[in-house]
Image: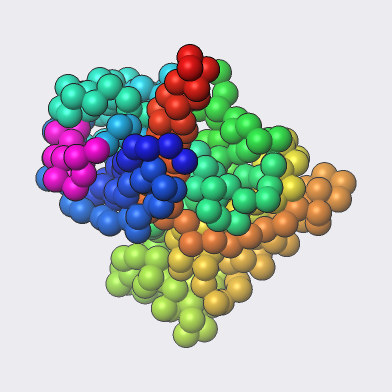
Amino acid sequence: MSEGTTFGITVSSGTATLCWLTGDGTVTTPETVNLARGDARGVARELADMVRIRRNDVVGLGVAIGGHVAKAHDAVTFAPQLVTADENWFETPIAELLREAMDLPDIYIENDVNCMVEQQRSWGAAQSMDSFAVVYLAPEVIGLGCGICVDGTVLTGVTGGAGEIGHLVVQPNGPRCRCGNRGCLQAVLSAENLVREVNWGNQGQLRTLKDIRTLADSGHAVARRAFKHAGTVLGVALANLINLVDPGDIILGGAEELVQSRDEVFVNAMQESLEKYSFSNLGISTRIWVEPLNAGTAAQGAAKLAYDAFVTTSADKALRIS
């Protein structure tokens, strides 16, 4: 690899997860720090400070954000998980704000799950795959995204909004989603919705997916039924993804209480409905890989995307000129 260090940062609600990629190809273990601000300008200043105190040889920055990121990789079109009283995160020129805060011209903004796609094909399960999809359930399922790679190319769509599987409407007039719509897959699988379902018989004592997981592990029928229904609904959505794209492999991760639990109620229901609603033999032939995807995975992918966009490209240009 060429000389130069690029940072990768995942911006989540209230936190930032960061790492860097050095010129010898070493990517660091991600670390997570709290953000004091929720507005875009304040977040940009905090991120700039994080980079400055850690390295003085930074030549590029990749930023992973959940939601609709502009195809030009310079702005957030809409990031509902980041919305606060001070910032609606709609049409937000985050790259410009970062350049003002840190005097670094080379900044690359990308959807967080697309960054996970890059991380998986650089260092993870997809290193030998040309076509695959990554499906990520954020903690408490406050977000649910998908990155799709076909024949080595990540699908972004005309405006950068491709892959928003979490906003497939799977239950018309269902629970309200953070995006403002009702019945989105993300809303149906969210901790908020599952807790609501299970609390009907538990006097409101549950608060998180971990609470439901503990109850389900004890054999509680209502909790297990809620997880089974959630798995069935996700399987339907994955069947639709398979029918549209035929990715061959799907890397699934996040939300440990659901996709990474030793209990197989959720996963078995997902696999059963995936195969039931897939066309022809597509469901049976699609391999599902469960990987520990998280904000750190996205940060590492963002660092690699920035490296490829700025360091490798600059080196190639220099070679052509010489």
Closer to us: 228 or 43: 43
**Where does the image place residue 301, in percent across and percent down from the top left?**
45, 44
Magenta region includes residue 149: no
Residue occupying image coordinates x 69% and y 42%: 130
Residue furthest top as drawn: 321
Q: Is residue 249 visible?
A: yes
Q: For the point 75% across and 41% down, which residue is it?
A: 246
Q: Would you say residue 55 sits in the magenta stretch?
A: yes
Instruction: Look at the image and give the residue range highlighted in magenta.
Output: 44-57
In the displayed structure, does residue 195 sit left or right of residue 284?
left
Q: Is residue 301 above or below residue 192?
A: above
The answer to whether 265 appears left or right of 40 in the picture is right
Figure check: 182 above or below 207: above
Q: How many marks?
A: 0
Image point (52%, 68%), residue name: 260
Q: Is residue 169 left or right of residue 25?
A: right
Query: Where 78 sits versus 43, above or below?
Result: above
Residue shown at the point (41%, 47%) measured from the top left: 24
Residue 90 locus on image (x, y percent): 31, 24
Residue 243: give x, y in percent of width and height. 75, 40
Q: Is 226 or 164 nearer to us in this picture?
A: 164
Camera sees residue 175 = no
Above/below status of 300 relative to 167 = below
Q: Nearer the viewer, residue 106 or 142?
A: 106
Residue 54 x, y percent position in the rendering? 19, 47
Of all residues, the one furthest to the right in this rendering is: 280
Most prominent secondary structure in the magenta stretch? helix
